[in-house]
Amino acid sequence: MKTNRIRYPVSLSIIVLATSLIGCATQPSVTVPKSDDGIYNPYGVALDPLNQVRSASITDARGQVAETYNIPTKNIYIDKKSEKKEDDGRESPAISKISPVLQEWIAKKKTDEPVDIIVTFQEDLRVPRLPELGSGESREEGKTRRADAIDTLKKARAESQARSVRQLVKYGHFKQSDGFWIVNSVVGTAKIGEIQRLAESREIVYLQPVEGGEPPPQDANANNDAQDGRDRIVSDPYFNLGLTNPWIGLLDTGVRDTHNMFNSPNHIAWMRDCVNGGNNCNDSSNPNFDPTDFSWNHGTSSAGLLTGNNRLGNQYRGVTAIRTDSWQIYTAGGLNTSAAVRGIQAGIAAFDRVLVGEIQANESETGTIATAADNAYDAGVIFVSANGNFGPNASTVRSPGIAHKVLGVGGFMTDGGAQYDNQGRGPATDSRYKPDIQAPTWSETASNTNDTALRVFTGTSGATPYAAAVAMLAHNWLRQFGSFDNGQTYAFMILYGQKEWPYDNTVGTGPLQMATNGHAWWGKVSVGNHMNIDIPINVGAGKRDLDVALWWPESATQAHNDIDVHLIDPSGIERAKGFSGVSVFERTGVNGTLKTGTWVIRIRGYNVPTGSQTVYWATHIRS
C-alpha cells in the first residue's frame, strides 16, 4: 500500500452510507447529496447527487438527454474477496521541506544574505466550495456571495498565520510581508543561514524562494497550424455548439491584447498584473504595472490557442470562443511564486471555471503553488497545468502539474503524433502517474512581436491550452444536463484519453480525443473499503467500443485510496479492468462490437484506508 507522507483519516459508517443510498432522489434535478461526498459545502452550492446515473445520446457533439436513474441499493455491497495486485509503485521517500532552488542558495550564498521566501504551514482550514455567480450579481462590481465567503476565509487565515509566524521566533528571524488565503502560506524575508533552522519547525511544510528563476514551459521550434491540433483533439464539433459560458483564467506571461486574433471579436476579458498589481492584481497606480506579454512571447500564444478568433484564417483559430482572463505572473527573470498564488486567488474570485497553469515551478507536491492548486479544486476550479520540459528522465514533472487535483499535461507533435521527448515525466513522489493526459504541441498561433504575427508554440506549454480548452468545453457540455461538480469534468478528461490500463509516466491516459458520436453515462459515488458499486448500463444492438474512466480527488496529506474499475458483459464475464495501485484515475475499455444487453461497470474500493472516497466516473460507447 502506498501512502502519502502524512495521514488524516476520515471515516464513514457503512450503515449511514447504506441509509443515505436508499433515500437518494430519483429525479434528475440537482440536490445536495444526503451522504458525505467529501465536499465541504457550507454555502449550499448546487452539487451532483451521489449514486445517480445520468446519460445522453451524442450526435456531432450535440447531446440529447436520455435516461436518468439511481444505482440500485442492492448493487452497493461489501466484498472482501480480493484479487492479488502487483504493486506498480514504490515506497514514498520523505519530501524535503526546502525547495531545490533554496537548497542551491544555501550552498552558494553567504549565510547573512537576506532572501525573500514563502513559508507554507500545515493546513488547518478546509477550503469550501465557493458560491457561483448569482443572478443579479456582477463580478465587475465585486459585491458577490463569493467575495463575502473569501473575506471570511481571509480573516480566518490571517489569524491562524499570525499565530504560526509568532511560533517561528524560536527557530530564527522571519519578517512577514504578505499572506495568502487559498493556501496557508506567508511571504517574508529570512537570512540564508536561518533557513535550515526554520525547516525544523513542525508547523512548516515547505520553504521556497519567491523568485526561483523558472522560465515558462516552452521549448525551441517547428511548423503546424492550430487547426491540425484541433483536429487531433476533435474539438470543432463542440466549438460549433456555441457553448461559451465564461471564464477561463490564464496564469502566464501576459497577453498582447492588441493582436488581431483577440479583437473583432474580442475574447480577452480581464488583463491583470499579479507581479506589480497588488493583492487583486489590478493596482494600475504602480508605475511598473504591465499586464502585457512584454518579455517572454508566451502568454499571447497560450491565449491564441485557447480563444483566438479567425481573423487571420480559420487554420489559426483557437479551440474555444470563451472569454479569457489573463493573469500575468512572470517577471523578465522568470516565475514569481507569490504572483502565481495571487493569480490563482484572483482567478477564483473572478469566477474563472478553468485555470490554466503555464508554469513549471521547481517544487514538490507540498509546495505553495501545488497546494494552492489543490485548494483551488476544493473551491470549485478545474485546474490544468503543463508537466514541464525537464524530461525525458523519470520524476521530472514540475508543479503544479505534479499536484493531486491538477490535470498534468504532456505533449505529442501536432504533425505526426510523435512523443515530445523533453516532456516532464512522473512518477510523483508518492508514485502517482504524470502526465494525466496528453495534447498536441508544436502548432502555429499568435505571437507578441506584432498584431498579425504568428509563431510555432512549443513544449508542454503548447499542449496545455488544448487540454484546458477541452476541459472548458466538456464542463459547458455537462452543464447542459445539470452536472455541476468539477470532478465530473476530470473524469471526462480521463475518458477522452486513448490509453487503457496499464499506464505509464510518458503518456498517462494518452492523447485527448473528445467523444462526438454515441452514448455517454456519468455520475459520482462514494466508495468504501472493499466496497463494490455495480452500475448497470443498457447497450443496444450494433454498438461498439465501450470506454470507462474514473477520477477521484485526493490531497497530498491523506493516505492513498486504491480504487479500481471492472467491465462485466451481459453474460457475467469480466472483459476489461483498470487496476492500478497508485493512480488517482483508472481507464479501460472493450474494443469492437459489444454484446447486446446489460453491462456492469463495477467500481471497487480495493483498499480505502480513509474510510470513504468520492469517485467520479464516465463511460461512452460509439454508435
Image: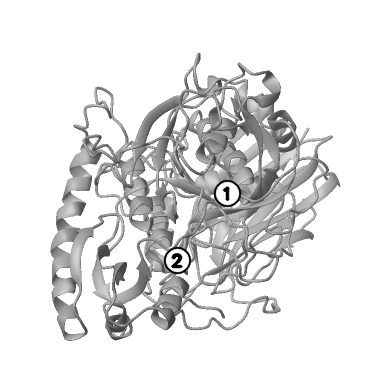
Q: Residues within 10 Å of mark 2 (few under 14, many from 20)?
A: many
**Residue 528, label in figure:** none
Quarter occupied by the N terminus: bottom right
Quarter occupied by the C terminus: top right
Q: How is the image coloured?
A: one colour
- Labels 2 & 1 near each other (Cβ < 8 A): no
Question: Residue at label 2?
Answer: 612
Q: Position of residue 189 (x, y in %)?
A: 24, 69
Q: Secondary structure at mark 2?
A: strand
Q: Is residue 61 visible?
A: no
Q: Position of residue 365 (x, y in %)?
A: 46, 67
Say what amino acid the circle numbered 2 marks. Answer: Ser
Foreground pick, 585 / 356: 356
Foreground pick, 574 / 519: 519
Residue at horizontal 54 percent and vertical 32 percent from the top: 448
Foreground pick, 425 / 502: 425
For residue 248, side relative to residue 441 (left or right): left
Q: Secondary structure at mark 1?
A: helix
Q: Residues within 10 Å of mark 1 (few under 14, many from 20)?
A: many
Q: Residue furthest top?
A: 264
Foreground pick, 187 / 448: 448
Q: Is residue 428 visible?
A: yes
Q: Position of residue 292 (x, y in %)?
A: 42, 34
For residue 143, side relative to residue 484 (left or right): left
Q: Quadrant of residue 158?
A: bottom left
Q: Residue furthest right?
A: 592
Residue at horizontal 59 percent and vertical 22 percent from the top: 452
Question: Residue at label 1?
Answer: 491
Q: Position of residue 258 (x, y in %)?
A: 47, 23
Residue at horizontal 62 percent and vertical 58 percent from the top: 389
